[in-house]
Image (spheres, rainbow, N blue to C red):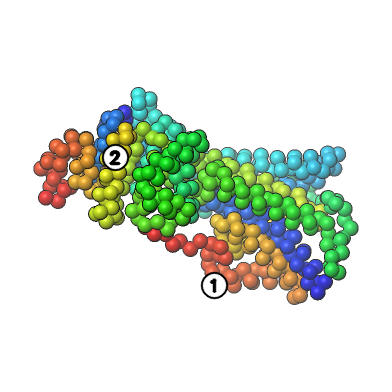
Amino acid sequence: MLDVADLHAAYGRILALKGITLRVETGEITALVGGNGAGKTTLLRCLSGVHPVKSGRVTFHGDEITAFPAHARVAAGIAQSPEGRQVFGPLSVEDNLRLGAFRRGRADTEAGLDRVYGMFDILKTKRHLQAAGLSGGQQQMLAIGRALMSGPRLLLLDEPSMGLAPLLVDQILAAVVALKAQGVTVLLVEQNASAALSIADRGYVIETGRIAHSGTGLALLHDPAVREAYLGV
Amino acid sequence: MPELLQFLVSGLTIGAVYALVALGFTLIHNASDVVNFAQGEFVMLGGMVTVFATAAGIPLPLAALLAIAVAVLVGLALHRLAIEPARGASAVTLIIITIGASIFLRGVAQIVFDKRFHQLPGFSGNDPIMVLGAAILPQSFWVLGGALIVFCGLFLFLERTLMGKAVLATAANRLAARLVGVDTSFVLALSFGLSAAIGALAGILITPITLTSFDVGTLLALKGFAAAMLGGMGSPLGAVVGGLVLGLLEALGAGYVSSAYKDAVAFLVILAVLFSMPQGLFGHRSVERV
């Protein structure tokens, strides 16, 4: 579904991505794990078109989208729940969700709201409150819900477990698995490698801007090198 | 008592104009962090184009529409030719670009129009209406009514339409706005166009009272900026309140202290407010749970 070939990206003169090649298969959860500053967030920003690509190609459903502006990628079916949630703080929960469907019609928006409220009923309870007043876990649900509102074929999730209590992490990951069951393809970026790999069909380990290991989620979980570097065992 | 009423009405009238200019600052600042010091030039264009168009025999309503259209075109060109190419530059750089643009526009206006002061007749005549002993120009009602329509229209746009929400979302979090598919550079162009239209309307409405000339925008931009700061830069409601308060302070200062010190009185109060509340009257203190 998504093919990334030899992608390079930089911040000023510092290369953050030094030739990333990876593949996300339709209907799967693909995990991308790695330490702080490895380039995970930069890669997702490149995929969403909010960070410039220096060289390389991104292909989505056979169409090259490397030069697409951000709004065209949302329309093409790629949505992102960004690192740090990035909810629209002063706006209400429901307005945040409606903006997630900015590129869609009214009927799709209402159907999307039902779907998101069905998944995260706490958002329905708090739909008239300011998003800034939600707890961290609720903001994370809102960020994922907002991304789902665009009706994406590919959902990019950047560190959904960051800063959350273990119980909430489980709840968020269960939601990701449920999304897969609904047919949404997911690219999941995580520092919490064991959690991400345990639900992933396929995984990539990124180190200082390069893919260091790849394989099925299960294989990576049991790979001694990955275990030592990222799983703390 | 009649004189207090007199001061209040003239304060509210000029304050409404400051509020409109401050709204222009707020819209563009929210969409881009740019403080657009060419805002006053939109006001100048509104007044000057209307004056010259009516002098050329075009009826006033058409001339006013033409003036707004010219200002919007200039605003869009300012965005397209001066702000958009410098995308990614620091806010300070962009602010200096707008100062340059404002000097440029004033220079062009000086050549295209002239260097004299101009007047428009009051839209409903120039005979004051006596209310409780105070003489009120009918044009004051035009200014207040026009400002009220703009405030309500802008409020409905921002609060009731998805595009308006997208403008607010862009102000709150530009990255997230782009990620949900908002074309933020369109939002920025829209903000420049709207600000220009609002500024031009202010210029058209106030010209029968205060006269206009090619350099009338400088002081108005300064006052509008002060009003926006007083209200809390970024808050549309703050811009309106800040503008009205500034206008009232000036009028009361001129009436009860001395007209020579009216600006000093106004700015002293602003300094006092900002010393005690640096975020302005309606500025948002950032309390967000993370």
Secondary-structure class at tag 2: helix
Which sits in the foreground, A58 or A178?
Answer: A178
Compared with residue A34, is residue A107 higher up or lower down, i.e. above or below? above
On whether disc 2 and disc 1 are found on a single subunit, the reply is no
The chain letter for the residue carrying disc 1 is: B
Q: Which residue is mark 1?
A: B276
Secondary-structure class at tag 1: helix
Q: What residue is rendered at 30% in x and 44% in y? A: A175
Compared with residue B246, is residue A87 higher up or lower down, i.e. above or below? above
Which sits in the foreground, B41 or A136?
Answer: A136
Q: What residue is rendered at 51% in x and 37% in y? A: A106
Compared with residue B276, is residue B51 higher up or lower down, i.e. above or below? above
**Whole-percent x and y of residue B160?**
57, 47
Count residues near mark 2 (Cα–Cα under 10 Å), then give few for <14, some for 14-19, many for 20+: few
Q: Quadrant of residue B143?
A: bottom right
Which sits in the foreground, A126 or B16?
Answer: A126
Contact (CB < 8 A) between labels 2 and 1?
Answer: no
* Number of numbered discs visible in the structure rendering: 2
The chain letter for the residue carrying disc 2 is: A
